[in-house]
Image (cartoon, rainbow, N blue to C red):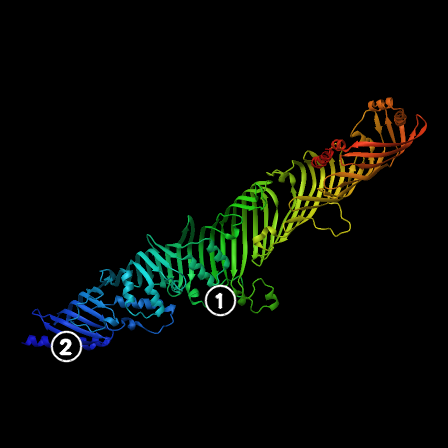
Amino acid sequence: MTSLFLLYFARVAIVQNFSHDELALYDAKITCLDFHFTTDLKLAISHLCLQIPQADINIEDITITLALAAEQKIKRIDVASITVKGRADLLTLFKSSPKKNNPARLTAQLKTYLTQLEQLKLPFNIQVAALSYSPFSKENSGTINSNNGEQKAPYTGQFSFIEDTLAFSLKNLQHNVLLSVDLSNTNQHKKALLDLKVSGQLTPLKQFLLAHKLPLAPAIIKFLGSLNTSGEFYSLLNYQAGQLILNWQLKNFSLVAAQGIKASGPLELSGALNLHSKVNLNTANLSREDKALNRHAELTVEFQHNNSLQLQYSHPHLIDYLNNNALSPLLISLLKDNPVEQLNFQPKGKLAFNLNDQQLSLSAIAIKAERAQQVHQLNLDNLAFNLKHYLNGDLSRHNNPVTEDPAKQSPLLAQLNFKLASPLLLSSINNFTDAPVIVKLQGSISQNHAQTIINLDENSSFTSNNIAMSTNKKTADKKLLSIKILATKIQGSVKIHHPIQQQTAMQGQNPVQVNNKAHIQGKRVINLNLKVKSQAEKLRVGEMIVVKKLALSSTIAGNLNNIQINATATADNVPLGNLTILGAVTKPYITLTAEALQLTDLLSLNLQLPTKIALVKGKLSYSVEGQVTDLTYFEKTPLAISIAMTSVSGEVDGIWLQELNWQQNFQFLAGKLTTPDDVSKERKENLTIALIDIPTPISKLSVNTRLSYEKDFTISATKVKGDILGGSFAIPKIQWPLKHGHSVDVQLTSIDLEQVLALDKKQGIVVTGNISGQLPISYDGEKYTMGKGELHNVTNGLIQVINNPAVAELKANNSQLKLAFDALQNLHYHQLSSDISMADDGYMLLKTVIKGQNPDIDNDVNLNLNLNYDLLGLLESMSITKKFEERIIKDLQKNKE
């Protein structure tokens, strides 16, 4: 009887203690209670109903093992089942007003939470065999009791806390484990050890969370509901003596946003992750240096085994989104030309994150995109970021320290090394090639508050294949220019100066000086310092030039508004000249120059010239200048061109030229090459040749030339003069090819008749003396004619006609001719003049007057002769330059027919 009395009062004490001290903490109350003692002195509660503002809790078949003699009365609790039915939004317990995050306290907060878990203990063991949970909904808001438990709860599970080990699991109706938690607290080497295992499946876990009214904005809840998630996660947390170690694994992960994020279009993220991480939260044993660097607050993550994430997205939606956010048109065009709808991310090595300073570093990550057999690969390593700067977005001077001394740099905000290999299609060069540009870039990027620096290593390059510039002409070969491979290697740095740096650094300076600086206030300035080496292989220009390797070595300095490029070109190791580009990149001023290039070296190249040229010496200088107005139509850029050849000697088409000197200026405008007008009154000869060695040599030739080219070359010349046949000739003006209405006035001065006669030698005929005169030749578009030409002697001379078979025959048959030819046997003339005309058949008529004296007959001689002369024969004997000769003879022969 005494024992039963004690048990009763012990039961009452337990219930009262539980009711007042425990339930009051949660604003809970008991709505039903049915219990009794078993024969083995255990407390058996067959039914217990609890009600809290958020849920009704029905507990069935509780067995409490008591230890009445001990200070702790309860030894163990076994529960057959617990049914929890939501009465209100369960997560309203966690709603609170947002507070500004204090990064400096993250470590302390995390350590506090872990310490609380580490100290989590119950004075007794508890085992719950079955747990049922029904979230709150308006359709299912009635109070549960023993009679309405027929409807299955959406979630079931188990719970236990035995010997400082907590185990909890929760499943849905399909028996999918949405969450499993194992927590154990042990002591090793007198130090508490916390082990926490958490695993689950994302699909049921997401459904579980959305079944509750999350403390989030309705738009976010709607978005989360539209996501399709799948995958399994496993995590193991170990905490001891301030050292936190976390192993985390994500398998078969997939997240699909069919509606996308805002206007992004459909998205899908999938893959797998295997992570091992640790963080030291204990500051007791750290050195001052480690404390100063916040090393105790650094979270390190090691990527183990396979780690890969794939992101699939809608390319058209991405382009629309970028257009709406005013991104660079150049970048948008690049993305349009190279559509990619999947990115693969593969992190490697270690990731470190300082919880207090929010400094993030990553060993490496590989990003890969693949489409239509084109693989774009970007590898990043040694990444480091100051997330505090980027997340807060505070650009004030306080958070962005800029020193007044430019040599002192502000702290780094970000840095990384990169290696890019990408074949890019560019619509802007479709007129020249349809092949992708192979981009290979390797280097580093660093950023502080003042500037962003991009360094490019020597392995960086751009390569294009099968480049061609075509003509609109209907010809068999329409290619004006073709290049098999064009490779460009680049090395150096690109500096992007931030506007805020410019504003701060310019404070206190003279406003005039500030306005003259390249770093314009409020604008981003890009400065370049690069070395570029370009090489074109198998270059062909029309049918004239074929070069195995054309090399261009360049330096680039300045910014996009004021660039300076200096380059040197060689072809098959032969110097070609220098290129300079100055000014704005969009409208640069271009200069191409060369000084004293050896023509013999240039001719050693594979040049398919229309005429055979074999020089022994000579130099070439040239200059091409112009400002590009439209890069799209670069070939239409107006140019000023100057060419000079000096001391040129050698054979041209089999004719020896000696000491040729030529200087000519051109202008290229609207596709036409012309010689600009010379406004000076005295135009000096720009072409001189010391000797043209033909059967009738021409020496001291000088001429003033003008050239033009659009479809064909046209040449005009003035002040043509030279020495020939012991005298000289002059042509005031000539144009080639001749056109209708053109005329050529050939002026002869002191021509040696003995040399002229030698061109067509006749037996027994001797003529000496010098003549001058002019020969006006006209062209009507088809025929050459001459009228009102005249020749006259400028010195006395001798005519001797002796022992000529033709003359002897004429003398024998005609007595009058005999008298005339007898006078010509030894005629010392003092007047020799001719009026000359030429018909379109090429025969010249010379109405000749000869006056003089024959000492053998001691008689004055006055002869009037009409002579016909074959101009074709004369030209052939003189051997004028081949093409000129062939053109004239061809026209004359046509007229003969």
**Residue 495 at what x, y percent from top left?**
52, 58
Q: Residue at x 51, y 60 (%)?
A: 496
The reply, left or right, for residue 616 in relation to residue 166 is: right
Task: Specify the quadrant of the image occupied by residue 289.
Answer: bottom left
Alpha carbons under labels 1 and 2: distance apart: 67 Å
Compared across the picture, whether 578 is left or right of 109 comes to right
Q: Amino acid at mark 1?
A: Pro
Residue 281 visible in this rendered orientation of the protein: no
Q: Is residue 79 left or right of residue 655?
A: left
Q: Which quadrant, please, contains the N terminus? A: bottom left
Q: Earlier in the sequence, mark 1 or mark 2?
A: 2
Task: Name the residue type under label 2.
Answer: Ala
Q: Which residue is mark 2?
A: 13
Q: Residue at x 87, y 24 (%)?
A: 814
Label 1: element kind:
loop
Report the disc number at residue 401: 1
